[in-house]
Image: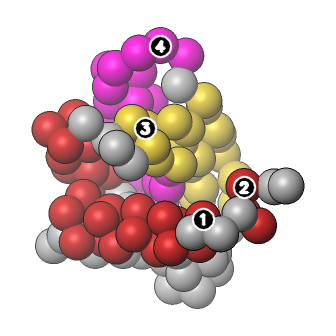
Amino acid sequence: MPACDRPGSQLNLEEDHRFLRELVFAGLKDLNTGFDSPLIGHFSPTDFLVVIDRCELLHVRVIGIEVFASGRDFLEAEISPEYGYDWARRLVQRYQGRSDVTICATFGVP
């Protein structure tokens, strides 16, 4: 049975989303204006560095990151090549200063 069909899995997804929204993304501007699922937060490179810092503090794993230009033009994706958060910071720092870039990620909530 797929994980999404197991009883309780939808509740876990909702709890994870609420945790991210209330603790990891709190106070940051979500740039997802409807071009992606409402469950996926997109942030500027500067705000995404804050997301990474909060993830590290809260022991939330950054599994993979996707980078887009102008909300819909795919630029890059990277799956965590190493343990920790330095790889994510290096990737995001490459886009610092670009106002047309949004960054989103897949997270492992403890």
Residue at image coords 43%, 38%: 62
Q: Disc 3 or 1, which lies upstream in sequence?
A: 1
Is disc 4 surrounded by few (<14), some (14 to 19) or many (20+) residues within 10 Å? few
Marks 4 and 3, Cα distance to the nearest angstrom?
A: 10 Å
Q: Disc 1 or 2, which lies upstream in sequence?
A: 2
Residue 9 marker: 1
Amino acid found under the numbered disc labelled 4: Glu
Amino acid found under the numbered disc labelled 2: Ala
The answer to whether the residues at label 1 and label 2 have Cβ atoms under 8 Å apart is yes
Marks 1 and 4, Cα distance to the nearest angstrom?
A: 27 Å
Q: Is residue 36 visible?
A: yes
Is disc 1 surrounded by few (<14), some (14 to 19) or many (20+) residues within 10 Å? few
Q: Which residue is mark 4?
A: 82
The quadrant holding residue 42 is bottom left
6 in the magenta segment:
no
Q: Which residue is mark 3?
A: 62
Amino acid found under the numbered disc labelled 1: Ser
x%, y% of residue 36? 63, 75
- Name the residue furthest top: 82
Is disc 2 surrounded by few (<14), some (14 to 19) or many (20+) residues within 10 Å? few
Marks 4 and 2, Cα distance to the nearest angstrom?
A: 25 Å
Magenta part of the chain? 81-105
The number of callouts visible is 4
Q: Nearer the viewer, mark 3 or mark 1?
A: 1
Is disc 3 surrounded by few (<14), some (14 to 19) or many (20+) residues within 10 Å? many
Q: Disc 2 or 3, which lies upstream in sequence?
A: 2
Q: Which residue is mark 2?
A: 3
Marks 3 and 1, Cα distance to the nearest angstrom?
A: 20 Å
83 in the magenta segment:
yes
Marks 1 and 2, Cα distance to the nearest angstrom?
A: 7 Å
- Name the residue furthest front: 7
Residue at image coords 64%, 40%: 76
